[in-house]
Structures are given as structure tokens and as C-alpha cells.
Image (spheres, grey):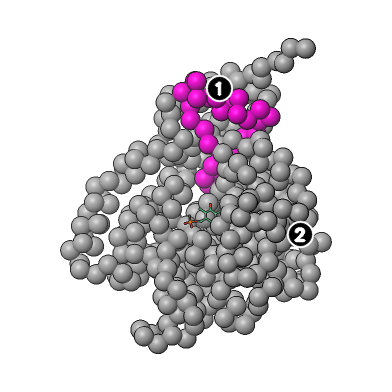
Amino acid sequence: MIKFLDLKNINEPYGKDIENAIKRVVKSGWYILGKEVGAFEREYADYIGVGHTVGVGNGLDALRIILQAYMVMGEMEEGDEVIVPSNTFIASIMAITENRLKPVLVEPDIETYNIDPNQIEKKITGKTKAIMIVHLYGQNAHSQKIGKLCGKYDLKLVEDAAQAHGAYHEEKRIGSLGDAAAFSFYPGKNLGGMGDGGAICTNNFQFAECCRALSNYGGETKYKYKYKGFNSRLDEIQAAILRIKLKGLDADNRKRKEVANFYLQNISNPEVQLPKCKDEASHVWHLFVVRVKNRDEFIRHLKEEGVEASIHYPIAPNEQEGYPELHKCDLPITNQMHKEVVSLPISPVLDEKQLQKVVKAVGSYQTVEVKV
Ligand SMILES: *Cc1c(COP(=O)(O)O)cnc(C)c1O
């Protein structure tokens, strides 16, 4: 069986280096906010091409703290609106509602699965304060059009970059495109740790320091609390692991691209819609998502052929039980998409034989004819 996500194999090439790094931290006697976090923050800021990185506990908190920082700095207030794609992972929306801001859902472009820039302007009101773009499945979601809207209406551009470490928009890396960006280092992400982790990237020093304070009880100095913050820090062991894996990120992303290109060139089945990639550098293929009409049947077929698939995501945010306020949204593309998407295995460590097997499994799928 080809696993959907084989973290053991993905981390195998880094094994010895990671063990040594962990030993170094254990021996140092310093486990929270020390040298490793400081070094990782500098290295990651350089990699992304921003002035500042702030390590935090996870990707959701990175987003949550960004919005909270705007609130404590007086740029946003309760009830203000944030534009967000309707087909994102729930964390993007949760970060907005957690801050008592209002998510305004915008449908994706079905070609890219990313927010449709042409549907944004009509959702902008006097209360809109930000556009949160999500680089879904690893593909850049930014565009000139979105940049212009932010300028025209004086909106913050916040990036949810949790799925797109290393991707580019034109000459710039994702995470450096707007006012602030959030990353997750959840183990399955393109840059994944061995536990939870996240980071905020920004070019604004004052904003970075505000985020740093919020993530550490709201204090810029110990025992003195400027804000009502909380505790969400990247730990030394995760930072040490991420420093090692960051060195291999570009190579890992290149291998993901090879896998994606292999699928794109070799999968041929009229019942299976392949994803579209506008230009090579803009996509780091966190996920390879196809669309099929009879999804359950398709997944069953793949399993019989020895291929494990997954779904990102089976239920749209506007249909989630925990979000009754979103149930009335009219989002036909989103609802359709969530019934059809299937994620095929993709990682830096799949070999040619495995790829052939996936191609064969997908290619041999046929909808069972319903006889009348
Ligand atoms: C993973 C993910 C997050 C949240 O990251 P965590 O570290 O799991 O909190 C946020 N947004 C998107 C798009 C993600 O894929």
C-alpha cells in the first residue's frame, strides 16, 4: 500500500542530523525562547525575504496573533470584516472568529482552487479591514489585482502561507507579499517539524514586536504585561529540527514538483480532472488535488489498487456544525468542490515505481454504469 503521507520516510534523510540537534538542545539546559529559536527566526526571515520572523506555537496561532496585533494596535476592532477564501482549511476562518472579527467568504477560481480575485471587490464594505489570502495546496494565491484592491480600499494583506513554504509570486517568496504572513510547521507541511510549530513573517518591526509580546503573555519584558496576550511559543527542540529541515526545503520542493509533473504528464482518465499550475515557481505542491464525480467509489478503487488517498477537505467551512452563522452563505462552487476533491499521495520521497502505481490506479478507474 502506498501511504497518503509517510512521515517516517520523509524525515528519514534528516534523521542523524535531527538526532544530533535534539541532543544539542537537551544538553544545553535551555528549552524555551533560546538560541535555536533566535537562529531559526533569522534563518527563516532570510529565506522568505522579510525583515522579521516570530516563532509561535502553531499555524492557527500565527494567524490569530497577526489579527490580534492589528486589534491591540488600533487598526481593527471587533466586528470588522476580513475577506477570506470560502474553501480554506478551518484555521484561516477560526483565526478571524476567535478575534471577534467577521469572516467574509469569497469563492475560489475553480481552475486554481485559490480565491477568485474577480469576486472580491463586491464583498468589500466600510467595515472591511483585510484580505486574507490562502496559498491553498501550495500554489500562490496573490495577484496584481488583489494588490490593487488592498491599495484602493486601504486593506491589510495577510497571507495564510501554511501550505506554501518556498513558493514564489513573481520574484518574491510567499510570506513576503503583504503586511504579515502566517506559517505552520505541522509535521505534514512542506516544512514540517516533529510536533506543533508556527511563525509570523513581516517587514514591520513594531508589528513583529507586538506579535512577539502577544505570544508571550502580552509582555515585551518579563512580568510586565502591555497587552492581554497568551502563551504560544515555538520551542527550542522544534526550532533546532526546523533549522535542519529548512536547509533541505528547496530540494524537497523540487522533488514534489517532479512528482506533480509526472502525474500531470502521465495520468490520463477523462473522469479525473487534474489540477492546474500557472507557472512552475508559484507552486510547491503541498497537495496534489484532483476532482472526480463519484468520489467514494474512486477512493475505494484506489485502495483496491494499493493507493491511499485523502480529502482536503470533505466538508466546506460554511457547512460545518460549529459555524451556524456561515450556513446561510450561498457558495455553489465551494459546495461542489468539496464533494469532488481527492488528494493523491505526494511527497519528496516517492520513487518512480510508486508513481507508476498511482498513475495506473488512477488511469484504470471507471465509473460503474448504472443499468436501467
Ligand atoms: C495547517 C494549516 C493551518 C494551521 O496550522 P496548524 O499549525 O495546524 O495550526 C492554517 N491554515 C492552513 C491553510 C493550513 O493548511
Label 1 secondary element: helix
Residue at mark 2: 120
Q: Magenta span has 290? A: yes
Q: What's the magenta region?
A: 284-310
Residue at 78%, 66% in the rendered image: 124
Residue at image point 50% right, 65% down = 62
First along the sequence among labels 2 and 1: 2
Q: CA distance from mark 2 to mark 1?
A: 39 Å
Residue at far left of view: 27
User: For the view shown, which residue lies furthest in the right direction?
Assistant: 122
**Residue 370 horizontal/vertical position (percent):** 72, 16
Q: Is residue 223 above or below residue 15?
A: below
What amino acid is at disc 1? His
* Viewport quadrant of the N terminus: top left
Q: Position of residue 169 (x, y in %)?
A: 60, 56
Residue drawn at the location 62% of the way across and 35% of the way down: 290
Q: Residues within 10 Å of mark 2 (few under 14, many from 20)?
A: many
| Residue 341: x %, y % from top left | 63, 37
Q: Which residue is mark 1?
A: 301
Q: Quadrant of residue 7?
A: top left
Residue 152 horizontal/vertical position (percent): 77, 71
